[in-house]
Amino acid sequence: MTRQPDIGGYDITGEHPTRELSDHHPDRSDFHMKTLKAKDLINVGIFTALYFVSMAVGNFIAVFVAGLIVPGLSSLFIPALVGLVSGPVYMLMIRRVPRFGAITIVGVIMGLFLLVFGHFALSFIPYALCGLLADLTQSLLNGSRPNLARYLSYVILTFGCTGPVLPLWFMKDAYVASLVRRGKSQEYINGVFAPITGITFLVCIVVTLAGALAGAWIGCRIVDRHFNRIPAGR
């Protein structure tokens, strides 16, 4: 039987030839752009707490393990180790709360935690900014390249953890002034800046990238293998 020609996008039988295609190929581009609901905010609070715990674990490993291996350089490895251990929390969060704003909230709260715990005042900005950029990345890429979105957004968020150490290279005078206000001795200040060189900056960036990628891979593997039956948030 010969198919009748379309009239205004419909064939004469009243069927819409493109509607069936759209039903079988849903557009996922709005996956991360839905408005946060009350239950989403609760979930974000829970995952933020878990992320904070994983961040504390990364700090512990850096101070008590990396500190023994490379004395004086432990703080430079904190972002990398936070990225290494926090991947499962992040990947589970973006599965359960697939809405724009969730990652931004995590970044802002983590930045506030850094301020509360006495870090350099401007350390808040990188975490908040990286949280927003990670959110935008997840939103824009998830529909077309979801795996890339997960990895790239997590790497971006992890670099927010470099906020406390970046001023060592780029805002030395202001950082020294903040240490003096906190009552630190000149000997302590000299020890803090002794390893700060261009080489150690590159090392910090490279190991942070490596730690974040490894943490993203671990997180994806754990979530895909053990939590794939948990429905994604709606």
Image (cartoon, rainbow, N blue to C red):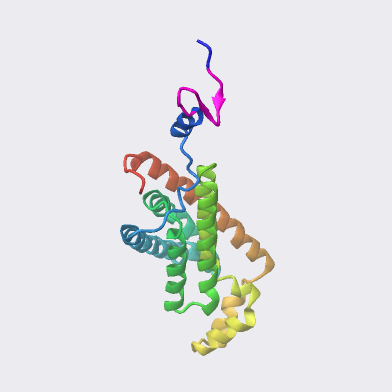
Q: Residue at x 58, y 86 (%)?
A: 177
Q: Quadrant of residue 54?
A: bottom left
Give the main secondary structure, helix, strand or loop, of the magenta stretch: loop
Q: Residue at x 55, y 25 (%)?
A: 6
In the depicted view, which residue is nearer to us: 214 or 97?
A: 97
**Is 26 situated above or below 55?**
above
Where residue 143 sits in the image (x, y, percent)? 51, 44
Q: Residue at x 46, y 37 (%)?
A: 26
In the depicted view, which residue is nearer to us: 232 or 16?
A: 16
Where residue 211 sits in the image (x, y, percent)? 52, 54
Q: Residue at x 49, y 87 (%)?
A: 182
Where residue 225 sits in the image (x, y, percent)? 37, 39
**Is 42 situated above or below 223?**
below
Q: Quadrant of residue 191?
A: bottom right
Q: Is residue 121 magenta?
A: no
Tell me the magenta residue range.
4-16
